[in-house]
Image (cartoon, helix red, strand yellow):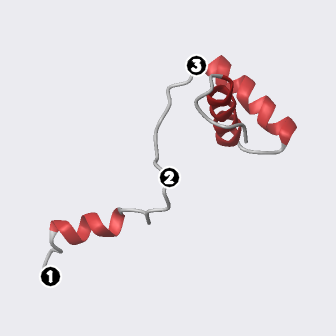
Amino acid sequence: MKKPAIEAAVARKMPPDDGKRTTSLRIKPDLLAELKVLAVRRRCRVNDVILEAIENHLALSGQRAAA
């Protein structure tokens, strides 16, 4: 059985370009617990809470228009 070329293997693993980038955050366990509680109250995901906080922070600092 022939192995696929490295370019083909990499191309298959790349997600479609939707204008978003994937990152990772290192969050203290107690902060993550508080974010989870907030997300449950709002009935959304922790990721949504974090993104909303980032957008609000940028709007407050004048870097971006409020959403």
Q: Specify the quadrant of the image occupied by residue 60.
A: top right
Q: Is residue 22 left or right of residue 36?
A: left
Residue at disc 1, secondary structure: loop
Residue 55: x and y, percent?
65, 35
Q: Is residue 19 left or right of residue 63?
A: left
Q: Which residue is label 3 attached to?
A: 28
- Nearest the viewer among 67 and 6 is 67
At label 2, which amino acid type do we have?
Answer: Lys
Instruction: Say whether disc 1 or disc 3 marks the residue closer to the N-terminus.
Output: 1
Residue 44: x and y, percent?
77, 45
How many C-alpha atoms fall within 10 Å of the one at disc 3: few (<14), some, or many (≥20)? Answer: few
Q: Which residue is label 2 attached to?
A: 20
- Nearest the viewer among 21 and 28 is 21
34 up-or-down from 7: above or below: above
Residue at disc 3, secondary structure: loop
Residue at mark 3 to residue at mark 2: CA–CA distance: 25 Å
50 up-or-down from 67: above or below: above
Instruction: Say whether disc 2 or disc 1 marks the residue closer to the N-terminus.
Output: 1
At label 3, which amino acid type do we have?
Answer: Lys
Q: Which residue is label 1 attached to?
A: 1
At label 1, which amino acid type do we have?
Answer: Met
Camera-side mark, 2 or 1: 2
Q: Residue at x 73, y 42 (%)?
A: 67
Q: Residue at x 50, y 26 (%)?
A: 26
